[in-house]
Image (tube, rainbow, N blue to C red):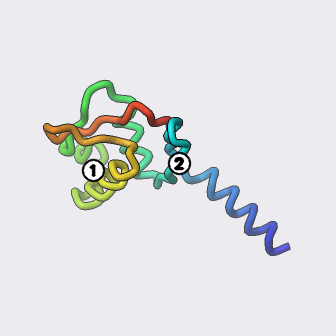
């Protein structure tokens, strides 16, 4: 009985936490709601997005936004351009 509760809670957790997957490598990253919001905005935009624009849009403290962007960059979900703007990697699917 205990294992069925764990499986059910894990399935519920998977439904709540969005995933961002790289179809080329098959690697997926679980995203928090904040990470998903930032990622989604960057991924749907054709133009690069600045840190300031993201901060104004989401009203996150700069340290929180920096951590989100760093994590998304480390997992190759987004890229930082040479001029400091953020764009989605072409191999990401939400």
Residue closer to the observer: 29 or 47:
29
In the picture, the disc for residue 59 is 1
Coordinates of residue 32 in the picture (x, y in percent): 46, 55
Residue closer to the observer: 71 or 1:
71
Q: Residue at x 13, y 37 (%)?
A: 83
Disc 1 versus disc 2: nearer the observer:
2
Q: Is residue 20 left or right of residue 83?
A: right
Coordinates of residue 70 in the picture (x, y in percent): 30, 54
Image quarter hosting the N terminus: bottom right
Residue closer to the observer: 51 or 81:
81
Q: Residue at x 30, y 58 (%)?
A: 67
In the picture, the disc for residue 28 is 2
Rendering quarter of residue 50: top left
Mark 1: which secondary structure? loop
Pointers 1 and 2 in contact (C-beta within 8 Å): no
- The vertical placement of 67 against 53, above or below, is below
Q: Is residue 68 left or right of residue 13?
A: left
Residue sticking out furthest to the right: 1
Coordinates of residue 28 in the picture (x, y in percent): 53, 48
Label 1 and label 2: CA atoms lie apart by 27 Å
Mark 1, other Cα within 10 Å: few <14 / some 14–19 / many ≥20? few
């Amino acid at each position: 009985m205990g294992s069925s509760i764990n499986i059910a809670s894990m399935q519920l957790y998977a439904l709540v936490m969005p995933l961002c997957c790289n179809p080329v490598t098959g690697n997926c990253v679980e995203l928090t709601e904040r990470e998903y919001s930032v990622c989604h905005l960057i991924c749907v935009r054709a133009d690069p997005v600045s840190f300031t624009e993201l901060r104004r849009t989401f009203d996150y403290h700069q340290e929180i936004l920096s951590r989100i962007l760093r994590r998304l960059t480390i997992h190759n979900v987004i890229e930082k351009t040479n001029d400091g703007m953020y764009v989605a990697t072409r191999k990401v699917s939400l």
